[in-house]
Image (cartoon, grey):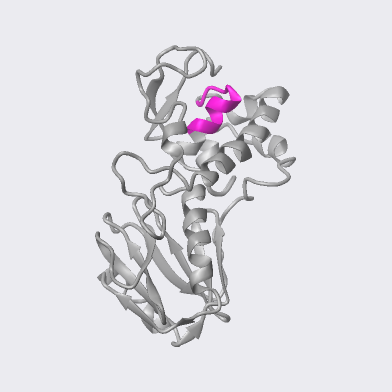
Amino acid sequence: MPELPEVETMVQGLRPLVEGETLLAVEAHDPKLVHVRPALDLPVEVRALARRGKYALFDLGDRLLVIHLRMSGRLAWGASAPEGRVRLALRFPDGAVYLVDPRRLGTAEVVREFKGELGPEPFGDLSWLPTALKGSRMPIKLWLMDQRKIAGIGNIYAAEILFRAGIDPRRPARGLEPAEVRRLENAIPEVLQAALAEAGTTLPDGVYQGPNGERGGFAVELSVYGREGEPCPTCGAPVQRMILGGRGTYFCPCCQR
């Protein structure tokens, strides 16, 4: 967390508040981020705010401010600092964007050009997917989470995508049958769009919130993630959990083959 739907929700919420506005000041409240302010010539106009994969990109003309929220970061808006560990504040005439990050894992960099090693976005034409999968021996869940292969998918949505597609997360990517790849092509955008429509997923820990503190509503629609021992919504078999690539992986042993 956060993954594509959560980052996109934050970007969409902040876009009308910062695009075309003047960034007046940058305040680093964490020694890890003190390099950000000297790299900017302030004040500066935010020309656009966009998302690429799990990154938020503030277009400042000849510079980009690139923020990656990692495991526990979020971007909040307000006239005063929200609750939680505020690591960075971007001040505008009518408020500020705050990087709130309890684990201090998020990053912020000022660059001339974004060079993240990211695969394609998981929307639109996915006709490239069969060829990309054929070249990899990786378990399909780890393939989906590899940002170099496809951008924006993390642990939660990889589990949900594979459940919808009926594919065992341990299967090698290159071993999927054509019909399974087609199901995967459909499941990837379907799950992500459904999560985006609900402003993302706020888990019981409450860490993820939208820019104004709103909670994502997709948690109630999760079919397998976080539901170990609960009945599969399709067949009723208990959802299982295993460790794959160091991450907890949830799946239905009957529906996913």
Image x and y of residue 239, in percent: 41, 19
Task: Find residue 147 and report its horizontal and vertical position in percent.
Answer: 53, 48
Asked if residue 9 shows in the view, the reply is yes
Q: Is residue 146 visible?
A: no
Q: Residue at x 54, y 54 (%)?
A: 53
Residue at image location 38% in from the left, 35% down from the top: 247
Of 208 and 251, the residue lying toward us? 208
* Magenta stretch: includes residue 173: no
Image: 141 above or below 13: above
Q: Is residue 112 above or below residue 235?
A: below
Q: Is residue 163 magenta?
A: yes
Q: Position of residue 125 (x, y in %)?
A: 73, 45
Q: Quadrant of the C terminus?
A: top right
For the image shown, how many numbered marks are present on the structure? 0
**In the image, what residue occupies the spot 39% across and 60% down?**
212
Toward which corner of the image does residue 126 lie, by quadrant? top right
Residue at position x 63%, y 24% in the image:
175
Horizontal side, residue 247 vs residue 49: left or right = left
20 or 242: nearer the eye? 20
Where 216 sits versus 28, above or below? above
Q: Vertical placement of 121 versus 189: above or below?
A: below
Q: Which residues are magenta?
A: 159-169
Overall secondary structure of the magenta section: helix
